[in-house]
Every structure is written in C-alpha cells, then in structure tokens.
Image (tube, rainbow, N blue to C red):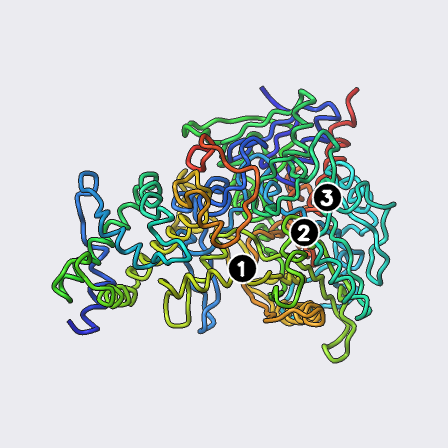
Amino acid sequence: MSFDVCIVGSGAGGGPVALTLAKAGYSVLVLEKGPWFTEKDFFKDELACCLRTVFTPNLRDEPHVVEVENDKGGWTRHSTYNSSWNFWNGNCVGGSSNFMSGFFHRLKPVDFRLLSTFGPIEGANVVDWPISYDDLEPYYHKVEHEVGISGKVITHPYAEPRSPDFPYPPILEHPIATYIDETCEKMGLHAIPTPRAILPYPSLGRNGCTYNGYCGSYGCASGAKGSSRAALLTRAVATGRCEIRPNTMVSRLVNDQSGKVIAVEYYEQNGKQKRVEATIYVVACQAIETARLLLRSTGPCHKNGLGNGSGLVGQNLLFAGGGAGSVHLSYAKFDKDKIRNFGPFINRTLQDWYIIDDPSFGPRQKGGIIDFVHSHPNPVARASRQLQGTNGLIWGKALKDKLKAQFTEGTYIKIEAFCDWLPNSNCHITLDPEIKDKWGLAVARIRIGFHLRNLQVGWHLAAQGAEVLRQMGAEDVISFTSGAPPTNLVAGTCRFGHNPETSVLNVDCQAHEVDNLYVTDGSFMPTGGSVPYTWTIYANAFRVADRIVEKLGGEKH
Amino acid sequence: MNRRNFLILTSSTMAAISMPLASSPLHWETLAAVQTHLFPSDVDSPGAKEINATGYLHFVLTNDPLEREFIEKGIIYLDKIGKYTAGKPFLDLSHKEREQLLRRFEMGTNGKRWIRKMLQYILEALLTDPIYGGNPKEIGWKWLEHQAGFPRPPINKRYHLL
C-alpha cells in the first residue's frame, strides 16, 4: 500500500503535518522510532521519567559521539555512553513534546532579520530568514487554538505584534509571582505571565492542569499539556486517514536516478526490515537525528547525503545560548506557608532585554529573555547534587545534615536566561566513522563549538535576573553562564533560504534538490532566536503542511 | 602498601577481576554494612536500614545484569583491599577502619564510581516511590518534608514494565 504522505518522526514537527493532511483528506503514515504511550502510562515516577531509560533509548545501544574543544585548541571526543550527556529527548509517539513544560514564546520580528538589523558577527554564520514574522504570525495564532496555549497579553517595549488575546487565560500561579511583580514594578521592568502550552481547564477533548508540581521531564497524565500526541495526533488518527506505526526505526530514505525519494526503509522492533512508499516524504526527527538520516540516505544523485549538494546538511546546529542562576528564599525571611506552597509554576518571564541597548555593554545588539522557575522538584536529582564535596564524596552524617538543610530550610528559585546560540562552523553533525548503533547504523557525531557572544549575553541576562531576585530579598544569589549546551533545545542543521548554495531547504521547507522531500522539525531554522523552539516548530510545521496540501492539489472533498 | 601501589590496584585491577557471576551470591551482608556506613541510622532520621536500602538494591540489580556485575566486582574488591591493608574482612572492621578503607577506595577511578553508585542507590531508596521497595511508608519523604506528585505509579506500571 502506498500513502500520500509518509512522516518520519511524531513530535512537534510531525504532528501538525499529520493532522493538516489527514483533515484535508490525504492518507498519512507516521513512523515513530519509540513506543506509543498514552496518559495511562504516565505517572509521577522519577525512576521512569528521569533515572532510567524508559522514554529514551539505552545509551549502551544508541549513543552519540560528542566533540568538545580542549585546552590545546583541538577537539576531544567521547561517546555519550557512560558520560553525563544525553541528546535523546523523548523517543515515543509525540516525541519530546510529551516531556516539555510547555514554556512557550513566539519569536519576534527582529529574529527574522538579525543580519540586516545588527550586521554580521565575526565567527558566526548569521543570516536573515527567507520569511518574515508576518508570514508566521497567523500560524502562531493557529497553534494557540489547535494546541491550546494559555497566557495574557501584556504591553511592553518588546512585545511582538499579534492577533487578539490568548484563547485561554494564564494557568494558576505560585504566590512567589506576586513578589516578583512587586519588585519588577519598583524597578521599572515588565514581568509577564509565561505563555504555556497547558490548558487551565478542560477543553479540546482534554482535561485541565492538575497543578501537582511535576511537569517538565514528565509525561502529562491529565492531557492538559499540548504535546503533539495529545493535541494533534490523537485527532489525526480519529479522521481514519492517519496511521501511526510505533517502534519503527527508519534506516534510509531510498532515492533513485531522478533524485527523488521512492521509499522509506525501516526496521521493526523484531529487527525485520520493511519498506513503504508515499508521494511526499516528511522528515521530523529533531535536528540531530534528521541530519543523521539525510546524511546516511545517499543515492545516485545524492553522493554526500540526501539533498546535501550545498554540503550544509548537519551544519549550523543550534542549541540555546544563555545563562542561569539560583537563589535561596529562606523560611526565616519569607512566609513559609506561602512560599512552600507547591504545585503551580511561578510563571514569570522578563523580555526587557530582548534587545540590549546599553553603551556600557557594547553596541546595540540582540539579547534575550529571563525566566523564573522553581528548582526542579525531582528529589533524587536534588539529593544527588549534594553528594560531591570539595574534597571528595560526602556520606555519613555529613550527607544527612546536608540533605536535611537542602530540603527543609527554604525554597530554591532558578533564573534561566535564553539568548541566541549563534550558528557557527564548529557546531555541527557528521556521521561517526567508527561507532554504530544497535542496528549497525553510524551514530551522529556532534561537535559543540560555541560563540563567545553567547557567554557575554548569557552572563548579562542572568545577572539582570539575579538582581531582580536580590532586590526581592533572596539570599545566596549566584548567576553564571556556560558554553555547555542545553541538550533538550535543538534546532538548525538544515537551514532554509532562497539560495540552494547556501541553504538546504527552500522557503517552503522543501529540499532544494529533492522535489518530494520536506523537513518540518526545528532543523529549518537558520538562527534560533532567544526562546525555546517548540511554538515556532509547531507554527512552521502548520505553515509547511498548508504548502504540502497545495502541492498535492488542495483539500479533497 | 604504599599509595601508588594502592592506586594502581584500585584503578586497573578491579576491572580485570572476573568471577563466575551467574552462580555466585552477591555479598549481601557486606553490601548492607557498606550501606549502613554510608547512610547511618540516627535517633531523629532514617538510615540505610530503615529505608530498606539493601532490598532496594536487590531490586535494581535483579533488573540490570551489567550493573550487578559492576557492584559485585566492587564489593569483592573492597573486601579484598580491607583484608590486605587491615588483615580483616569489611564486616570485622571498626567504624574508623571502614571509613579509612572507603576513603582509600574512593581514590581510584573505579572505586569512586562504585561508591558514587552505592550512594545513588541509597538516595533512590530514600526518595523514590515506595512501590519499588525503598522508602517504606514514605519514611524518606516524611523526613525531608517532600511532597510527591500524582498520579503515583501502580505496581503494574513500574518503570521496568513500561
């Protein structure tokens, strides 16, 4: 049997395409490497979510190889097996969107025009996007309704132009939000309720948030979180025209003399190899695995990887730049009953430094956002962080005293600062020539070079956030930055653009060189903006889905 | 034994010891004593015994043969060093001698990794859902005033069954 569209990957990049095409009357097949969990499989179990490999592959079977710069200016390599790195973010139907905290921001108009607004940056491959904010705005709006986004529009200097207010009011907030609001008002800053892909009450056939305090890293048991699975794929399947095949690992996109894709080859769980055909093929495996799949899908017209005539597949990998910080709110100083209250998010973001226009910092330049969150409540993770002392491991009574203080003497708040991860020639994916996964396929080798600007801006933003909390009365205030990437925020590797020599995809996210191949995850982004990617990935995937419907001849009725 | 020889012994030999694993019982008594040393009981707080750290470790190792091998090699080797340096098995050492031995063991790469893992599984026994065997009657959560999330995992949805 042949399908109209075959989508590889079921996360935020795959879901919108599956739903749009199925609703338009086309037959859709979604191939997902991991299993198909539902709300009935999600519990607040730290072992399942975070300490064992239930929702991500075992790194013994499927590692990545990481390259980091060493002191001598060379690159040191290691396998993620038995290291603290893990670049898998959720291998199951719905992908990593199952495990996000729904912390959603749009890009702003300036993010589509970084090069023309601020000029080139030495050592960074900054370019303008081939589309503008206005092209994507209707789709950001669409996501608010299709996925379900709660929030409140607040006027501030860097607010993006947008359609009317959010379809859902903000979710409930932690009392600490009030302290932050009061402090920000005194400081002339604009604390805004963080938009969330979380329903505050039952709607769209899903339940509302239960506010039990365990959200990010956990699958949502109520369905309130707008994962690709809960919000989109369930509806796509209900049309009767979308089939999801879990536990299928795609090994290759088979392509012929014409340069087009003619089939997908995949492994079933039992190791059996299968093949399936479609008219249009869509890849959405998250940036790293998308590039890896294209690079290994060579063919008569694609010697260096599918659609890789530009040599740019795998290049300009993006994470999120930024800084972080932490503070302690002691029960001696703050009302214990109020701040110990546990469940809702603090839910406050500052965007006052989206552009940094401060001569003491440097020329006018792109900044980012600051977010205030509770330290993640996972107790084993919190406790494990107390094990390392300055002179070795801590155990015995010393460990117990440290645990007691950490858990019972106050609340820890984190500052998260996000800025652009500048695309650069030392941040990319290639196929590792030595290490193979359990199917015998070359694993991705990930080189993680970062631009110094990430650190400067990240440091500046984290310090601003720390100052807000210091003014609020927090203690033990520390803020810092690091070149280490957040491995759950990934984009780039197949940048889109007008010129086939300098980009992989065209403006419709169709491969320049492969007429029936589209890429709809975060891979298309040439620059990342300074917010988490998911809303933009959803919006762009809905935009590309409309183009695919047009290409297939419009809606079937 | 001088420090250098000890380090060589702890960092390289440990990986080379091979044991018939399938048939040999783990040295549970010694493992339990190590856990008690790392996480002692107190009048006002639970220790390894109260949180059922040994029972929990048994659960973990039953479901992970590679980990079982690593923990087993470690305990055999720790005991061997104890006999070599103090002339006694771990179980016969005083509190002070146990501390010295573990601190020495920590100086080797594999020794440190082994103790880190032992501590990690103690913390898991202290703070994961009682359905896995540790944290009986939420004793660990209560001690640290920890509020668990919900829904909690039922017996048929424990992580190794998903």
- Which of pointers 2 and 1 indicates the residue nearer the eye? 1
Q: Is residue A409 or residue A422 the one in the foreground?
A: A409
Q: Residue at x 71, y 60 (%)?
A: A127
Q: Which residue is drawn at 82% across and 61% down?
A: A158
* Residue A325 shows up from this direction: no
Q: How far apart are marks 3 and 2 (CA)?
A: 27 Å
Residue A55 percent coordinates (x, y): 50, 40
- The amino acid beneath tag 2 is Phe
Q: Which chain carries label 2?
A: A
The numbered disc on residue A540 is 3
Q: Vertical placement of A382 versus A534: above or below?
A: below
- The amino acid beneath tag 3 is Asn
Residue matched to label 1:
A408
Q: Residue at x 62, y 61 (%)?
A: A413
- Which of pointers 3 and 2 indicates the residue nearer the eye? 2
Residue A172 percent coordinates (x, y): 73, 47
Quadrant of the image occupied by residue A159: bottom right
Residue matched to label 2:
A345
Residue A476 percent coordinates (x, y): 59, 71
The numbered disc on residue A279 is none
Classify the position of the N terminus of chain A by image quarter: top right
Which class describes the residues within 10 Å of circle 2: few (<14), some (14-19), or many (20+)? many
Contact flag, marks 2 and 1 (Cβ < 8 Å): no
- The amino acid beneath tag 1 is Thr
